[in-house]
Amino acid sequence: MDITEIIERLKNIADHAIHTVGGAPFIMSLDDGIAVHEAIELLTNYPEIPDSWVPCSRKMPEEHEWVGTKQFGTTISDEVYVTFENPKGERFTKHLSFQNGKLPNFEQRTIDAFYKGSVPIAWMEKPKPWEGEVDGKTD
């Protein structure tokens, strides 16, 4: 089930609840057994929803092999946005990939050189490019 299906099912459930139970609190399940509160949690933590950061302690980006990593027996994630925190509690964000569940060596050296002691604390998938119009023109 993808995000669009979840949203559509939640809308239908909410409409049904308003018309049949007058909007009173209710617990219902979606067709495949996902409870409404679980679906809402999925929506709020779904990486494609803007501003939904995933804590590194909970889950890391999925990795895969590609021709540049296969010969070394390693895997790499797609590029993601990563929030780092330094020992003073200051945060910054970089755009990079993880390799074998951690920062690639060159990225780690850069972080160590410029942002001593900073560690990745959360990540978010890159949003899809905008396909809207600007002043009547599609970019």
Image: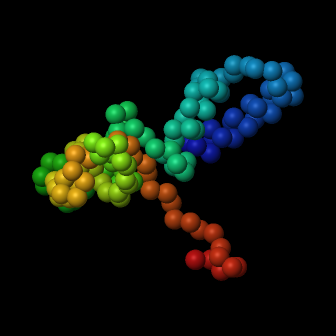
Q: Nearer the viewer, residue 130 or 91?
A: 91
Q: Does 11 sit left or right of 63 as displayed? A: right
| Snapshot colouring | rainbow
Q: Is residue 135 left or right of residue 21?
A: left
Q: Nearer the viewer, residue 69 or 32?
A: 69
Q: Position of residue 81 (x, y in %)?
A: 39, 54
Residue 104 percent coordinates (x, y): 20, 53
Q: Could you tell me which residue is drawn at 37 percent across and 53 percent down?
A: 92
Of the 4 image quadrants, the one containing the C terminus is bottom right
Q: Is residue 28 above or below residue 92?
A: above
Residue 80 visible from this viewpoint: no
Q: Quadrant of residue 62?
A: top left
Q: Residue at x 59, y 31 (%)?
A: 39
Q: Quadrant of the N terminus?
A: top right
Residue 118 placement, left or right of 17: left
Q: Residue furthest left?
A: 72
Q: Position of residue 46 (x, y in %)?
A: 51, 41
- Residue 106 x/y as whole percent: 17, 58
Frontmost residue, 1 versus 53: 53
For the point 52% across and 48% down, the residue is 51
- Displayed quadrant of residue 31: top right
